[in-house]
Amino acid sequence: MRFFSAIQNIVTRPQQYTVLNNGPTEPDDWKARLAAQLPPLHARSPFDQLISDYLTEDEKPDLSSLICECMKHGNVDVLACVLAHEDIKTLCIEGPIDERGWKTFAKAMPDSLLVEELELSEVTLDESKCKLLFNNVLIRMPALESLSLTRVMVKRDGSFDKLKCPDLPLLAKLEVWAYSNPNVSVYPLLREILKACQLRRLSIDASEAITGREHSKLANLLRDQNQMASLKLKIETQKDFQCYMPFLCGKTSLVELDLRGCRIQGRNFNHLIKALSFNQSALESLFVGNCSLDGDPRDKEMVVIDLLPLAELKGLKHLDLSGNHLQRRITLRLLVELKAAATPLVTLNLSGNLIGPPAISAIAAFLRESKTLLRLSFEPSVTQTNLRDVGVILDLVKAVKDNKSLLELQFRWDPVLDEFRASVDAYLHRNRYAPQQAFMEAAVQTAEAFVMPMLAGDLQYPQDMIGHIISQGLTEHDALTLSSINHATRASHEEFLRKAGS
């Protein structure tokens, strides 16, 4: 018989383990009392040993693992102590967890458990467990801000008509990842959460775990999400993606739209891009990589992809078009339009598309004008191998040299062009350390007049010192700290002179 049944008289509810007002109590007294109930070392089960490690060892086991084991063993008492005394902000409940496990957790929970991030992983639920989750667990997590459902499966054998998610006023982020299984779905949970909560960020990667009819219902629920700033979808069939087109093409509050891996295809893509340019004026990030834009071979006519409306998105900062096998003329026209519109891009990913010498020249022209671009990727498609136009590459190298913002350039360098790669890497390194260099020079200028005259014999020439510190990887925080120290030194020195003169 396990030792934990012996502590039933010690813990009946989590609240009884809080510090009482009628006298001082050592914060670890409850651990000592539980440790005293442990069986002898030779008689301990692996679960007993896990509890022992938690109570006595300096390097304690992960709290989420401990909580899950308590649920799986049906141990209310120890779980109640853990939930009552530990400050748990992040919790991962990993299955399999049976109904007894969920009842154990619900019984052990205090009235308010201030978990901010909750992940359910590899958990299978039926109607009864869903009700326990909503009515006995989530309802007592008033601080919950983020919920992740990873490979959570809900059996399709229930009606779920009376299922209702509690109001979670702080819940802002929901992530769903599930895999295909004809007997289970994540839809009932997702449906009820969308009904009850106004989310800021939603990610759904569960295309084949949701039926076409369920996709249609979810798309309708999205229309009631008035505060959503970020939406990530991965829909692997064109028919299912079509369900979301009315929402995506309408007016929303979206700032970030991530459709990477969705099977959009040409006609829907053109319609979507045009609609975004009219209706999504707040959009800053658009990720539409690997969206099967090369079309369906069964189509009788080819659809020409039109990217020009993207230049109408005046606030666009992040654009990913990678892996779409776009033709040379399409990427070329887009680059020309982005430059003409002075689009304030911070990241641009054109990898996996056809890039010819004219497009590289257009990239160079864009770099010469851009003051915001930090990361650029245009590794050509694997079907394209010959980009050895030295004149065009020289133009690109000069553009990188003149650009003071670019930090990262991903480009498949042909061995013939390796000599230019070293120059580009040097210019990017210069840009990455330019802010630190500026901070350091300002700090040294401040210190030079007040500190260095007194320590000149012990210091190198200021620029040598700057170079040494930069080579050690000085961060902006380090530089600001040094600048603050120098400012304080200057103030103290002035105060000393003022007192000396008075």
Image (cartoon, rainbow, N blue to C red):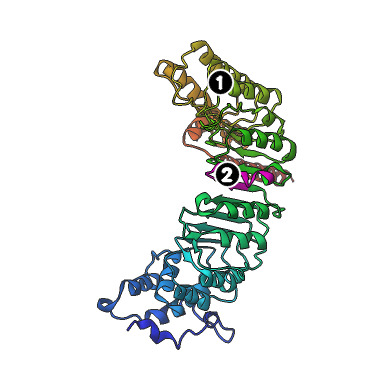
Q: Amino acid at mark 1?
A: Arg
- Neighbor class of circle 1 (other Cα within 10 Å; few <14, some 14-19, many 20+) is some
Labels 2 & 1 near each other (Cβ < 8 A): no
Does residue 459 appear in the picture of this structure? no
Distance between mark 2 and mark 1 Cα atoms: 29 Å
Relative to residue 226, is residue 158 depicted above or below? Answer: below
Q: Position of residue 418 (x, y in %)?
A: 42, 19
**Residue at 55 percent of width and 85 percent of height:** 23
- Residue 47 x/y as whole percent: 35, 72
Spot occupied by residue 12 in the image (x, y as percentages of width and height): 50, 85
Give the quarter of the image for residue 285.
top right
Name the residue located 60 percent from the left edge and 19 percent from the top edge: 362
Q: Which residue does the numbered mark 1 point to in the structure image? A: 328
| The one of 443 and 278 positioned closer to us in this rendering | 278
Magenta part of the chain: 231-246
- Of residues 333 and 56, the one drawn nearer to the viewer in this rendering: 333
Q: Amino acid at mark 2?
A: Lys
**Residue at image point 57% right, 30% down:** 434
Residue 90 vertical position relative to residue 365 in the rendered view, above or below: below
Q: Closer to the N terminus: mark 2 or mark 1? A: 2
Residue bearing the label numbered 2: 239
Q: Is residue 194 left or right of residue 39?
A: right
User: Residue 172 colored magenta?
Assistant: no
